[in-house]
Image (cartoon, helix red, strand yellow):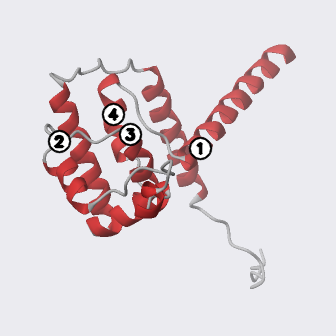
């Protein structure tokens, strides 16, 4: 039998394909198990002071992750709401007085005495780019926050599930 030489332009077979399929199957099984497992029971807060402390801690974590100073966060929140001293002093006022660093420090350091108003969470989420405060709020009820990327992945997962179901039905109809 003659030995053939392999053409150097010929592509080699990618043997990692089997590994990719195995990891895909494992990930699919993990997702299906997570979907079928019952959600954890909600953990109620003992009192509103505990909730205030949890929210303040989440905001602190979000700020820490951005590497922004609190002064920068205050400025960004005021820009987000369009707050300025001039707008606050207009007749009628165009906005509330700007947030100060002292008030932000009170909200974050003394949350039982100065609970942060909920509308600031909009600005905190926008400024920090973190959904940590919202995740803290929904976690006691067993909820989770999904980012835009995670929502797209879930939509792809649902599409994949529907395609699999259609293939099963197609096989059954062919029998």
Q: Which disc number belongs to residue 153?
A: 1
Q: Secondary structure at mark 4?
A: helix
Q: CA distance from mark 3 to mark 1?
A: 20 Å
Q: CA distance from mark 3 to mark 4?
A: 5 Å
In whole angstroms, how far apart are the C-alphas of marks 4 and 2? Answer: 15 Å
Q: Secondary structure at mark 1?
A: helix
The N terminus, quarter of image = bottom right
Residue at x 48%, y 56% (from the top left corner): 90
Of the numbered discs 3 and 2, the one sitting upstream in the chain is 2
Question: With 43 as the anchor, is 21 left or right in this view?
Answer: right
Residue annotated with mark 4: 137
Q: Residues within 10 Å of mark 4 (few under 14, many from 20)?
A: some
Say which residue appears at 40% left-offset and 62% top-offset. Answer: 85
User: Label 1 vs label 2: CA separation?
Assistant: 36 Å
Residue 68 shows in this picture? no
Is 79 displayed left or right of 157 in the figure? left
Q: Which label belongs to residue 134?
A: 3
Q: Position of residue 67 (x, y in %)?
A: 31, 69
């Amino acid at each position: 039998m003659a030995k053939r030489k392999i053409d150097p332009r010929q592509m080699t077979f990618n043997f990692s394909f089997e590994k990719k399929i195995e990891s895909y199957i494992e990930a699919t099984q993990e997702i299906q198990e997570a979907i079928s497992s019952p959600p954890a029971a909600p953990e109620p807060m003992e009192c509103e002071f505990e909730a205030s402390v949890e929210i303040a801690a989440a905001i602190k974590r979000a700020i820490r992750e951005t590497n922004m100073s609190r002064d920068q966060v205050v400025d960004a929140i005021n820009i987000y709401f369009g707050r300025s001293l001039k707008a606050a002093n207009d007749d009628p006022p165009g906005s509330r007085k700007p947030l100060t660093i002292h008030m932000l420090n009170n909200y974050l350091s003394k949350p039982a005495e100065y609970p942060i108003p909920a509308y600031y969470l909009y600005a905190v989420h926008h400024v920090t780019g973190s959904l940590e405060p919202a995740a803290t709020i929904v976690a006691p009820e067993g909820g989770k926050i999904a980012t835009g990327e995670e929502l797209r992945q879930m939509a792809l997962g649902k599409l994949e599930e529907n395609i699999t179901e259609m293939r099963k039905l197609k096989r059954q109809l062919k029998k």
